[in-house]
């Protein structure tokens, strides 16, 4: 069995997920990639190299899909060293805007999706006694944005990270599995459909932060990282 680390990424077909996959491949990780959009996922696998990359079309809000993604990664590589629970989405701000179905999809993806990703992969990490969870939250998960249900989902994502760390240390008595919550400000990804009045972060800026956390020594747990554009006013 190869000693090269294996990183599982959800929401890997574009944006921060795809940028992180590229940087992780350059750093020597083997990859298990999940996303709902199958064609961009296939394109990314062809770009990165089929042998060291496994892609599984999956919806993080669907437990059977998340189980299948995890099982496929373990079958191919026999280990998962790190999990980047990154899949997420947003809707138009305002409690009178957008549709209730859009709200439902966002909440299921941004909150339940993180929890299901943890549930599917945690038993393997507990068995090994080591590993690393990285969770994509948001600056909007620290500062309430007016009329934003998205903000509420990202507050929840941050709480999931803190809750996982507390369970590991206080309940599971585990001292080897690390948990990092990454909270970006505005990022130039498909999430934004309008021009921002300042230069946003690039997806690669966030990807570098994720890799920085993953590459810390085992005794270092980079618990929370806020990364924002220099010119962002809040």
Image: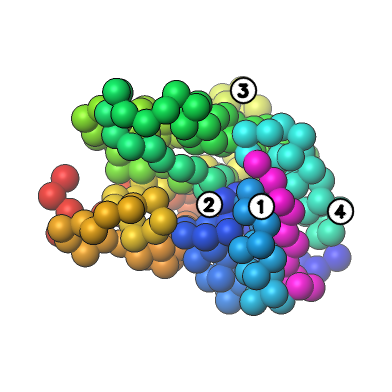
Tell us which disc is closer to us: 2 or 1. Answer: 1
The residue lying at 62 percent from left, 54 percent from top is 37
Sequence-earlier tag: 2 or 4 = 4
Drawn side of residue 188 relative to residue 121, left or right: left
Q: CA distance from mark 4 to mark 3?
A: 29 Å
Tell us which disc is closer to us: 3 or 1. Answer: 1
State which region is magenta.
50-59
Does the magenta-highlighted stretch encompass residue 57? Answer: yes
- Say which residue label 3 marks: 171
Q: CA distance from mark 2 to mark 4?
A: 29 Å
Q: Mark 2: few, some, or many residues within 10 Å (few <14, many ≥20)?
A: few
Tell us which disc is closer to us: 3 or 2. Answer: 3
Does the magenta-highlighted stretch encompass residue 116? Answer: no
Sequence-earlier tag: 3 or 1 = 1
Sequence-earlier tag: 3 or 2 = 3
Q: Mark 1: few, some, or many residues within 10 Å (few <14, many ≥20)?
A: many
Q: Mark 4: few, some, or many residues within 10 Å (few <14, many ≥20)?
A: few
The label number, if any, that marks residue 219 in the structure image = 2
The secondary element bearing badge 1 is classed as strand
Sequence-earlier tag: 4 or 3 = 4
Tell us which disc is closer to us: 4 or 3. Answer: 4
The label number, if any, that marks residue 34 in the structure image = 1
- Say which residue label 4 marks: 75
Above or below: residue 160 compared with residue 42: above
Residue 164, given in percent of the width and then of the height, sits at 55, 31
On-image quarter of the C terminus: top left
Work out whether residue 4 or residue 71 is closer to the camera in this orientation and state it: 71
Asked if the residue under mark 2 is in contact with the one under mark 3, i.e. CB atoms within 8 Å, the reply is no
Asked if the residue under mark 4 is in contact with the one under mark 2, i.e. CB atoms within 8 Å, the reply is no
């Amino acid at each position: 069995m190869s000693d090269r680390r294996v990183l599982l990424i959800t929401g890997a077909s574009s944006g921060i997920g795809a940028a992180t996959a590229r940087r992780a491949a350059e750093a020597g990780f083997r990859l298990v990639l999940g996303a709902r959009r199958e064609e961009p996922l296939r394109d990314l696998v062809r770009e990165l190299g089929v042998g060291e990359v496994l892609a599984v079309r999956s919806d993080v809000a669907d437990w059977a899909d998340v189980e299948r993604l995890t099982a496929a990664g373990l079958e191919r590589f026999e280990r998962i060293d790190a999990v980047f629970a990154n899949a997420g989405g947003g809707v138009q701000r305002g409690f009178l805007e957008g549709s209730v179905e859009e709200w439902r999809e966002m909440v299921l993806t941004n909150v339940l999706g993180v929890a299901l990703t943890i549930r599917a992969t945690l038993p393997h990490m507990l068995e090994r006694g080591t590993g690393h969870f990285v969770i994509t939250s948001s600056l909007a998960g620290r500062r309430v944005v007016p009329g934003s249900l998205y903000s509420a989902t990202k507050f929840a994502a941050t709480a999931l990270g803190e809750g996982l760390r507390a369970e590991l240390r206080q309940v599971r008595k585990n001292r080897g599995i690390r948990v990092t919550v990454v909270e970006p400000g505005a990022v130039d990804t498909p999430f934004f459909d309008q021009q921002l009045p300042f230069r946003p972060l690039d997806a690669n800026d966030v990807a570098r932060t994720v890799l920085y956390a993953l590459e810390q020594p085992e005794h270092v747990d980079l618990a929370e990282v806020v990364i924002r554009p220099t010119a962002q006013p809040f």
